[in-house]
Image (cartoon, grey):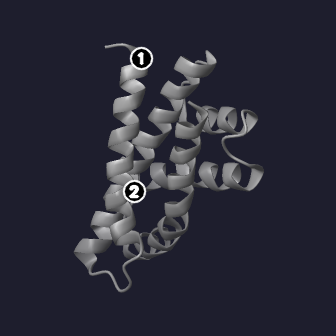
Amino acid sequence: MASKNLLQIRMETAKKILTKLHELAVKPDLSEVERDALIQRFEFSFELLWKCAKEYLYVEEGIDAASPKKVIRCCRELGLLDEGQTQEALQMADDRNLTSHTYDETFAQAVVERIRQYDPLLQSWLDKIGDAR
């Protein structure tokens, strides 16, 4: 499959997944099951979005960035993220790693609040990739 097609497919999939993330991110008073679902949706969303950005960098800019943090920094250099968004995205990458390897009640509640803050950034990042194409 051509890389431009892969990028398009990833962008379409990311849009759908971000919609699902948003549904829970804006919902107040999540049950334990909903909270866990939000965390898992965040993990999926972040993974797909950084890989979408990685594909964009490679296909459109000729940049081969291998890690989420490298992709985030390259997006900053290209103006797809501003400095504040870059710092937030780097924290998001750290949180994504922690959600995969750590779990306790206190952490889960804290990360849910941060995911609610990340929700608009994820959508904005995807929109900027789409606009840049």
Q: Quadrant of residue 117?
A: bottom right
| Res. 52 visible in picture | yes
Q: Which residue is mark 1?
A: 3
Residue 107 location, quadrant: bottom left
Residue most extreme to the left: 33
Looking at the image, residue 56 sits to the left or right of residue 86; the answer is left
Please, which residue is most extreme toward the bottom here?
29
How far apart, in angstroms, are the residues tagged by discs 1 and 2? 25 Å
Instruction: From the viewer's side, name the closer residue of 49 and 67.
Output: 49
Q: Is residue 38 above or below residue 95?
A: below
x and y, in percent, of residue 42 in the image: 40, 56
Q: Residue at x 46, y 34 (%)?
A: 52
Q: Is residue 100 visible?
A: no
Q: Dot 2 surroundings within 10 Å: few (below 14), some, or many (20 or more)?
A: many
Q: Quadrant of the C terminus?
A: top right
Which badge, 1 or 2, is on the more N-terminal residue? 1
Q: Secondary structure at mark 2?
A: helix
Q: Which residue is mark 2?
A: 42
Q: What amino acid type should be assigned to the residue bearing mark 1?
A: Ser
Q: Nearer the viewer, mark 1 or mark 2?
A: 1
Q: What amino acid type should be assigned to the residue bearing mark 2? A: Phe
Above or below, 128 against 107 in this view is above
